[in-house]
Amino acid sequence: MPQEQTMEPARGDEMIRPSGLQAVFPDKARCPEIASPFGSETRYDGSRRPSWEFGGYHGGIDISLAEGTPLLALAAGTVATKDEGGQLEGNYLWLRHSPDDTGLPYWVYSKYQHLLSLPELSIGVRVVAGQVVARSGKTGTTGGHFRAYGYPHLHLTTRKSPNGDLIVGARGSTGGANLFDPLVIYHEAGAKPQESAVTIPYATIDGRIWPQGTRVVWPVACQPK
Ligand SMILES: [Zn+2]
């Protein structure tokens, strides 16, 4: 089947439902946690999401963060795209992760939104898991629901595809990459795939990784207690 080359349909046409997975953070570390999970019908502040955006379901995870917090590559990969999005999107970065990078049987495309500024990383450059790739911000969040102040946070979206050559950009990608809960990555890469509780692997800001040998890490550094 030839690959579809049109931009994906407008937001709202994609099926999004909660995955049922629950993030469990390790006892020995303090990690910035999820403020609004994938598939949630509410924002971090409890307000209802509008139905015109993915049918009212959250298309990623939100992690509330002070502006300027370092954001980490959730796995090794390649810088696919970076750009200044508008309202709701903000400055964003897409990384492309091969099956070799993650150990998963599909390609993962990860998108970091609302960045403080455009990352300096060049398109095509390789990154390693846990590497600082951007700084969190609140671009694209001001003026709407969050008023003049905005909402400083990371919105992380992930898409999966059998194809490693998709072009990713504003809003989404060219055909065939489905939105999915980023927790699925940690779940499928982890040791307990039969459980809905997902123990989150992480990196520290000085580059240590837990558990040893993990190829995927939380997109924000955790602090050992
Ligand atoms: Zn979000």
Image (cartoon, grey):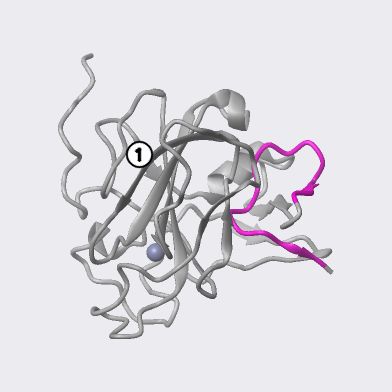
Residue drawn at 29 percent across, 77 percent down: 142
The quarter of the rendering in which ligand 1 is drawn is bottom left
Residue 213 among those drawn in magenta: yes
Question: Does the closest atom of ligand 1 sit within 8 Å of the Cβ of label 1?
Answer: no
Image height of 34 relative to 78, above or below:
below
- Can residue 39 be seen? no
In which image quadrant can residue 66 be found?
Answer: bottom right
User: Is residue 97 toward the left or the right of residue 192 in the image?
Assistant: left
- 37 or 157, which lies in front? 157
Q: Which residue is mark 1?
A: 178
Locate the C terminus by quadrant: bottom right
User: Is residue 221 toward the left or the right of residue 20 in the image?
Assistant: right
Q: Label 1 is placed on what type of residue?
A: Asn
Residue 13 among those drawn in magenta: no
Residue drawn at 25 percent across, 33 percent down: 174
| Residue range corresponding to the magenta coloring | 207-224
Residue drawn at 45 percent across, 76 percent down: 44
The residue sitting at the bottom extreme is 148
Q: Position of residue 25 (x, y in %)?
A: 71, 62
